Image (cartoon, grey):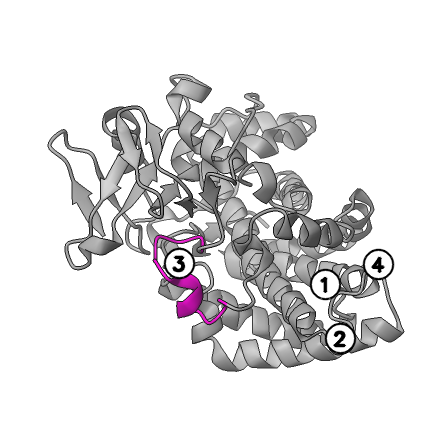
Amino acid sequence: MTATLSHGARFELCTAETWANPWPMYAALRDRDPVHHVVPPEQPDHDYWVLSRHADVWTAARDHETWSSAQGLTVNYGELEIIGLADNPPFVMQDPPVHTEFRKLVSRGFTPRQVQAVEPAVREFVVERIERLRAVGGGDIVAELFKPLPSMVVAHYLGVPDEDRKQFDGWTEAIVAANTAGGGISSPIATAGDAVASMMAYFSELIECRRRDPGDDTISHLVKAGVGAEGDISGTLSVLAFTFTMVTGGNDTTTGMLGGSVQLLHRRPDQRRLLVERPDLIPDAIDEFLRLTAPVQGLARTATRDVTIGDTTIPEGRKALLLYGSANRDEREYGPDAAELDVRRRPRNIMTFSHGAHFCLGAAAARMQSRVTLTELLARCPDFEVDESAIVWAGGSYVRRPLSVPIRVAG
């Protein structure tokens, strides 16, 4: 889907071939056409708008009454019907107050205590995988570390017992891989058939188990609150949809952030050296890495009324793509060097986890994983090198993450 205007700005949904460098396209949109109208030649009735400036994206993200998530999060019209979730949409595709009530229940499993509880296991896993890379002089750090790490953390939050982690990782791999084929945020539910069916059957049994033996995980908190009680088919489906959202959202984003961060550090040895010499700067630097990598590059909303931004009106019922990746690099918000890595910047109001009612519940867990991983990597492999020519990017048009990042490290 592409639109070109007389003043030269153009938007095109990204692919595996174009994810490496979408930044010039974003900059042109911000400068020349910040409320950009896309009319696909093959489907002109599926037109949508693209918001690229921070102020506009920020305003839209926090105004769920005007910009609804209930019609899906991609630019595809009829998205929920396409993926078979119209009758039981996941809570990320709902608006307050329905979204708020379910979110309150889910948030009980995303407390600071949960983050603290899993951090030692995260560190142990990270150290083990980094040492494996060091022992052989390098390898694919995504396959070895950045992809399996978030899978372990998601399993922890969902209460998957240790003995079941292997099969859970297999389902996760199949579902996340299906998301590279495009088609939208929830396309894996239609394309990863067997894995989705197996995972849903497993979690149906886990729900029953948590009724009898609750823990401190998210599913236990939902069950304890009565969601998915015996005979509550709709509630059970809501829990299952939540587990699916956790698998897709919790994995892609952390992988994308870490995969992008090592590239930024490779390109900026001065910034890397600063963190190596001053590891105390790493916790505050995480938001700068999140700003520049922005794994979820954009999600769509649907206008519930006519909305005028500048001199452009977006009609009621039409979709707008909130381009988080562009907003995070807007010079109007972050200064003329917004495109550059500055580990001392401490940026405010980043859009990486969205904003408002739909702010990402897993933000603290993602920050923790990133902090631990970068701290251990820079301490143990301060001079790692990234083979940028061999990086492979995942497909799909909304999440920017590498499938493979080869690195070389000293033993």
Place residue 184 in its image quadrant: bottom left
- Packing grade of label 2 (10 A; few <14, some 14-19, many >=20) is some
Q: Amino acid at mark 3?
A: Ala
Q: Which residue is mark 4?
A: 216
Labels 1 and 2: the sequence-earlier one: 1
Quick check: can you spot residue 138? Answer: no
In depth, the one of 178 and 283 nearer the eye is 178
Residue type at numbered disc 4: Asp
Residue at 65% across, 71% down: 234
250 left or right, relative to 218: left
Closer to us: mark 3 or mark 4? 4
Q: Residue 394 bears which disc, if any? A: 3
Q: Is residue 318 left or right of residue 142?
A: left
| Amino acid type of the residue tagged 1 in the rendering | Leu
Which residue occupies 56% across, 59% down? 147
Find the magenta span and give its range.
Answer: 72-86
What kind of element bears circle 4?
loop
Residue marked by disc 1 = 158
x, y percent for residue 89: 54, 63
Mark 2 = which residue?
206
Tag in front: 3 or 2: 2
Callout 4 crowding tier (Cα within 10 Å): few <14, some 14–19, many ≥20: some
Q: CA distance from mark 3 to mark 2?
A: 31 Å
Q: Earlier in the sequence, mark 2 or mark 4?
A: 2
